[in-house]
Image: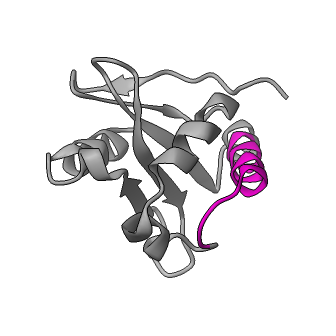
Amino acid sequence: MEDVLTPELSDGVVLLRPLTRSDGHDHLAGEDQELVRWLNGGAGTVDTVARHIAAAQEMWMAGGPTLSFAIRSAQDDRLAGTIDIQLQPDHAPQGFANLAYGLYAPYRGRGWASRAVELAVEF
């Protein structure tokens, strides 16, 4: 399957675009104890991350129910984390979405999560 292409969202600092197969290695390198603590499946492996990205691309093509973005640096295109838009989650009223995000250690505490959330809400 080819990587899914959709428009990018950016505020000049943070860039959101769908995860691609080439993000797998950088995602694994960014995982630390704090991030793994919040991941549903625990620490990733090459295989589990590849399957996750393939599933994320399939959901993009299907229009959901979860749309996964890579959070990237607009300056140098480095992967900084991920943010998922969960459309119509079971626990929310009709028309609502849930956001789930994680940032790699070098990007925490710098306002990147807030920027990514604002872009996701705009989307």
Instruction: Looking at the picture, tell me which residue is in the foreground, 89 or 99.
Output: 99
Quadrant of the image containing the C terminus: top left
Farthest residue toward the left? Answer: 110
Q: Position of residue 72 (x, y in %)?
A: 38, 32
Instruction: Looking at the picture, tell me which residue is in the foreground, 64 or 11.
Output: 11
Is 25 displayed left or right of 106 in the figure? right
Instruction: Looking at the picture, tell me which residue is in the foreground, 9 or 75.
Output: 75
The stretch in magenta equals 42-57
Residue 115's place in the image compared with 104, above or below, is above
Farthest residue toward the right? Answer: 1
- Name which residue lies at 64% across and 72% down: 41
Is 1 displayed left or right of 109 in the figure? right
Quadrant of the image containing the N terminus: top right
User: What secondary structure is the stretch in magenta mostly built from?
Assistant: helix
Tell me if I can see residue 22 in this picture.
Answer: yes
Q: Quadrant for residue 37, please give it.
A: bottom left
Numbered marks: total: 0
| Residue 16 among magenta residues | no
Is 119 displayed left or right of 4 in the figure? left
Residue 35's place in the image compared with 85, above or below, is below
Instruction: Looking at the picture, tell me which residue is in the foreground, 80 or 66.
Output: 80
- Name which residue lies at 70% across and 57% down: 45
Farthest residue toward the top? Answer: 75
- Name which residue lies at 22% across and 44% down: 112
Q: Position of residue 8 (x, y in %)?
A: 44, 23
Tell me if I can see residue 96 in this picture.
Answer: no
- Name which residue lies at 79% across and 23% down: 2
Q: Position of residue 90 (x, y in %)?
A: 57, 78
Residue 100's place in the image compared with 7, above or below, is below
